[in-house]
């Protein structure tokens, strides 16, 4: 029995730490996934708190995994991880059964898994966690209490430090579709042989104050004037994979002209700076001014891509660089995926991403741009 407990404890602890570390590489990704759930539930007022929720959840997941491995205060942590797994299982069940959320974000973008697989995984893990809960009194700590506390403090500090680093400097392991080496036009295409989602039109009616949902194959036999139409939507009954890795990446001028394909098809080097929201310190800070000067001398176009078009236009005019840059509009969701830091600079050749830097690393971009040939 002790061997079984030890094996399950190690498995659960390692899985919690592994899951937390993957999310720690991109806490903004988990934050955006939380916003997706909140939007589905109309909890829009929570959108401003999702990053804080993400940071704390990731830290707790890692610390809980370490505590399980150490066997420290299992009476407390067995309750905490059980409640956490019930919550996670609810989320993945909702995503799977409703079809309104394609992925739960359990392992971030590095290991994308479908809602159905996520739900199955959480059910299995819930059983293992419940087993540890039942045998919590038999688990003895591996270290004296001061040693365990010291390890947990280090795990907590390390968890926050990793997340701070990636929020400032971009993810260490880039699993996003805009990672270095990817060709944006190719990633905008549906993968060959992909299957579309299989959907069924689902109707929502109100009858005597109760909401009823059904499709054409399950139409009520007693349907009459007491049924009042509310809405209809496409319910996914089988998920496909006919979704391009990059979607909604459309670059338009201030007048609404779509320049996406022409810009990405243009040969030669170009610099994209993604600016989600305008900040008074951007874009013409000292380091970027050096980059802009070098790019201008080498005839390398510099394009600002933003969802805050009017404010950015006003700012570049105020800073006197309007003639040196092109400003294009883009969907805010696409920018959030492309730029995990605000702003983020890309170096492209044609439509292929050669390098990318967060605002904190523009010093590293200067020698890279300086080495480029004139064009």
Image: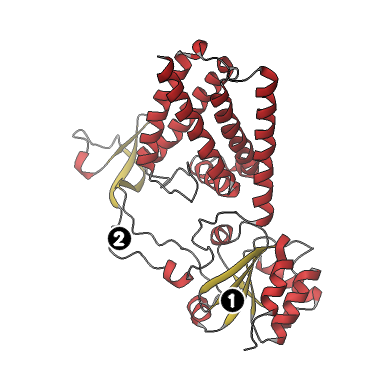
Tell me: 361 left or right of 230.
right
Q: CA distance from mark 2 to mark 1?
A: 32 Å
Q: Is the residue 57 above or below the residue 313 in the image?
A: above
Q: Nearer the viewer, mark 2 or mark 1?
A: 2
- The quadrant holding residue 227 is top left
Q: Earlier in the sequence, mark 2 or mark 1?
A: 2
- The quadrant holding residue 252 is bottom right
User: What is the secondary structure assignment of the residue under circle 2?
Assistant: loop
Q: Quadrant of the N terminus?
A: top left
Q: Quadrant of the C terminus?
A: bottom right
Give coordinates of residue 319: x percent, y percent: 80, 74
Give coordinates of residue 68: x percent, y percent: 54, 24
Q: Nearer the viewer, residue 330 or 20?
A: 20
Residue at 35% in and 48% down = 233
Residue at 68% in and 86% down = 298
Give coordinates of residue 308: x percent, y percent: 66, 64
Judging by the rendered image, the residue that carries numbered circle 2 is 194
Circle 2 residues within 10 Å: few <14, some 14–19, many ≥20: few
Residue at 54% in and 26% down = 69
Judging by the rendered image, the residue that carries numbered circle 1 is 253
Q: Which mark is residue 351?
A: none
Residue at 64% in and 83% down = 300
Tell me: 290 left or right of 42.
right
Q: Is the residue 310 above or below the residue 86 in the image?
A: below
């Amino acid at each position: 029995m002790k061997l079984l407990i030890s094996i399950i404890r190690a498995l659960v602890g390692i899985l919690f730490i592994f899951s937390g570390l993957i999310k720690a590489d991109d806490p903004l990704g988990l934050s955006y996934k939380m916003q997706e759930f909140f939007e589905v539930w109309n909890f829009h007022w929570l959108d401003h708190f999702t990053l804080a929720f993400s940071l704390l959840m990731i830290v707790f997941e890692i610390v809980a995994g370490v505590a399980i491995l150490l066997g420290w205060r299992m009476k407390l942590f067995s309750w905490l991880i059980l409640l956490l797994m019930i919550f996670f299982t609810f989320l993945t069940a909702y995503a799977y059964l409703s079809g309104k959320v394609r992925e739960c974000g359990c392992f971030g973008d590095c290991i994308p898994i479908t809602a159905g697989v996520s739900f199955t995984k959480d059910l299995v893990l819930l059983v293992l966690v419940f087993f540890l809960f039942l045998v919590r009194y038999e688990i003895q700590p591996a270290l004296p209490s001061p040693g365990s506390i010291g390890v947990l403090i280090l795990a907590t500090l390390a968890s926050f430090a990793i997340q701070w680093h990636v929020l400032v400097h971009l993810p260490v392991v880039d699993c996003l579709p805009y990672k270095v080496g990817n060709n944006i036009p190719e990633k905008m295409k549906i993968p060959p042989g992909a299957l579309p989602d299989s959907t069924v039109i689902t109707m929502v009616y109100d009858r005597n104050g109760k909401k009823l949902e059904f499709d054409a194959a399950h139409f009520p036999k007693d349907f009459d004037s007491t049924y009042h139409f509310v809405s209809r939507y496409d319910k996914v009954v089988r998920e496909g994979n006919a979704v391009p890795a990059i979607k909604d990446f459309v670059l338009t001028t201030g007048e609404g002209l779509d320049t996406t394909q022409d810009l990405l098809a243009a040969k030669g080097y170009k610099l994209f700076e993604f600016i989600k929201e305008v900040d008074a310190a951007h874009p013409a800070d000292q380091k970027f001014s050096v980059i802009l000067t070098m790019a201008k001398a080498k005839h390398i176009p510099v394009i600002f891509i933003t969802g805050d078009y009017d404010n950015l236009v006003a700012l570049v005019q105020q800073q006197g660089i309007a003639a040196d840059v092109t400003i294009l509009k883009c969907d805010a969701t696409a920018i959030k995926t492309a730029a995990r830091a605000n702003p983020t600079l890309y170096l492209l050749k044609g439509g292929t991403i050669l390098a990318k830097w967060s605002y904190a690393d523009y010093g590293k971009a200067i020698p890279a741009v300086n080495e480029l040939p004139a064009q």
